[in-house]
Image: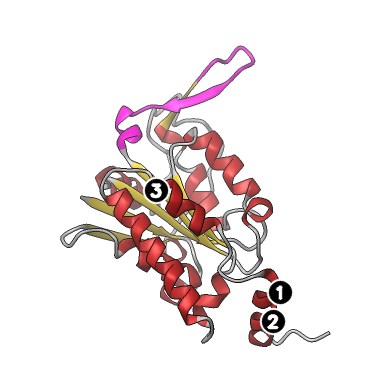
Amino acid sequence: MRLLVLDASPRGENSHTRVLTTAFLSGFPEGTQVETLELSRLNLHPCLGCLCCWTKTPGCCVQRDDMERVYAAIERADVIVESFPLYFYGIPGTLKTLTDRCLPYTKAYGWSGQAQHEPRDPKMLQKRLVLLSTCWHTGIERNYAAVRAEYDLICDGRYDAIFCPQGELFVIDACKRQKDAYLADVRLAGQNVAQGRRIASEIQKRLNRPILSDATFERITRPHWQIVE
């Protein structure tokens, strides 16, 4: 099995989301081939909106930059993990650029007013996509509403997601028992995906619960941020 991690955090190995990703990967069996691309280190140009990948050069972007390396890695992968922080309700800029540049994988149809997208390569439907993300705020529904809406449109619901709004706790020396229990469930989620299954509903429910209550989370993290009244 080949697994591709697209790391969209500007902090790389020091990111809070990397803790989540490492726990998820630990659920895969020994021998799994893991390739990690740190997007902040790549030269990725924004999509030009020229639609040549639909018309003049079907399935191929006209730009020549590090997206060619990303395309090749996606082609090799069986499971694609997008690991990213959430700062302001949406995916970070580098990941949005990459996502826009994945337009060559689709073809347009229904030009008569109901334009939609479908995969150009049926093999793309066989790949598993998992979203892993942390942020500092509490609550999944509001903070990740825009992310879910975008990926529901792009992937038609064919993806798994672990969103951890209290990711700041991973770098604070507190609540070790609660963090360990949460990361143990993340590992179980990795095992589910490694076995070709969706994340089990009971595991997903536990992962959707906050690690701490909102009040306790704020009390613990305020000193870390040196927030003053």
Q: Which residue is mark 2?
A: 219
Quadrant location, the C terminus? bottom right
117 falls in the magenta region: yes
Q: Residue 22, relative to residue 32: is it above or below?
A: below
Q: Which residue is mark 3?
A: 199
Which residue is nearer to you in this view: 117 or 222? Answer: 222
- Which of marks 1 and 3 precedes in the sequence? 3
The residue under the point 66% across, 66% down is 137
What percent of the width, then of the height, locates residue 166?
58, 69
Q: Nearer the viewer, residue 17 or 66?
A: 17
Could you tell me the amino acid type at mark 3? Ile
Circles 2 and 1 in contact, beta carbons < 8 Å: yes
Task: Identify the residue shown where x is 65% and y is 51%.
Answer: 141
Is residue 217 within the magenta segment?
no
Numbered mark located on residue 53 in the image: none
Residue at the limit of the structure toward the right, as seen here: 229
Taking the spot 37% from the left edge, 44% from the top edge, the residue there is 198
Look at the image and give the residue range highlighted in magenta.
109-126
Circle 3 Cα neighbour tier, 10 Å, few/some/many (<14 / 14–19 / ≥20): many
